[in-house]
Image: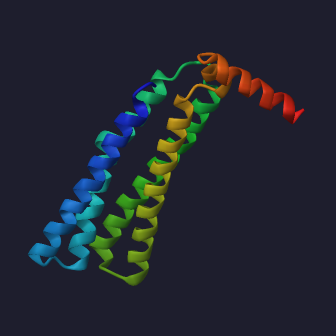
């Protein structure tokens, strides 16, 4: 999992750029609100189903056996991301069949917010999981190692 946060970050950044490009295009061409929502939703569902979720699954499959806590965390977050993507796809169908409503717009916005929050949490947790514990880093520097041990003694 050495480069996983970076590669996942690239996929999520790519998704955000796609949404920005769609927004710019929709404004320039005068799309209606339902058209903009449908385009953003379709782009998001496709990005998650084709690139982001497979990346998470691949990283989960490559996780070291010792990292049981990280692996179980990944599974929980991945399940929630899958659920949010499915909900977004269901809302997309509702938008097509029922038309644009304020309630539907709020649910769509909430789902987008949940996806972004889960992605942020995934990246932050992945970055923390990549760092070796402080005591392992301290062994590389004798001065830092002594300072860490002194600090740990002062806590007792």
Question: What residue appears at the point 51 percent right and 23 percent down from the top-left corner?
Answer: 63
Q: Position of residue 138 (x, y in %)?
A: 64, 22
Q: Is residue 91 visible?
A: yes
Q: Is 120 on the left-hand or right-hand side of 141?
A: left
Residue 55, compared with residue 100, is above or below; it is above
Extreme residue in the left direction: 29
Question: What residue appears at the point 59 percent right and 32 percent down from the top-left corner?
Answer: 70
Toward the viewer: 66 or 99?
66
Quadrant containing the C terminus in the rendered view: top right
Residue 72, compared with residue 140, is above or below; it is below
Q: Position of residue 104 (x, y in %)?
A: 40, 76
Q: Is 75 on the left-hand or right-hand side of 89?
A: right
Could you say which quadrant of the image residue 153 lies in? top right
Q: Is 34 on the left-hand or right-hand side of 148?
A: left
Q: Position of residue 136 (x, y in %)?
A: 63, 20
Q: Is 103 on the left-hand or right-hand side of 7?
A: right
Residue 61, compared with residue 118, is above or below; it is above
Could you say which quadrant of the image residue 68 lies in? top right
Counting labels gives 0
Question: What residue appears at the point 29 percent right and 51 percent down from the top-left corner?
Answer: 15
Q: Is residue 54 visible?
A: no
């Amino acid at each position: 999992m050495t480069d996983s946060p970076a590669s996942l970050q690239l996929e999520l950044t790519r998704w955000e750029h796609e949404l920005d490009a769609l927004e710019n295009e929709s404004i320039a061409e005068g799309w209606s609100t339902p058209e903009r929502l449908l385009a953003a939703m379709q782009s998001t569902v496709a990005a998650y189903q084709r690139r982001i979720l497979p990346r998470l699954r691949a990283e989960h499959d490559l996780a070291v056996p010792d990292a049981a806590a990280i692996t179980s965390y990944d599974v929980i977050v991945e399940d929630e991301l899958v659920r949010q993507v499915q909900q977004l796809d269901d809302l997309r169908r509702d938008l097509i069949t029922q038309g644009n409503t304020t309630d539907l717009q709020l649910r769509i916005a909430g789902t987008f917010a949940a996806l972004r929050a889960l992605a942020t949490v995934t990246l932050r947790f992945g970055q923390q999981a990549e760092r070796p514990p402080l005591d392992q880093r301290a062994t590389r520097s004798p001065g830092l190692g002594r300072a860490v041990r002194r600090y740990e003694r002062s806590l007792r």
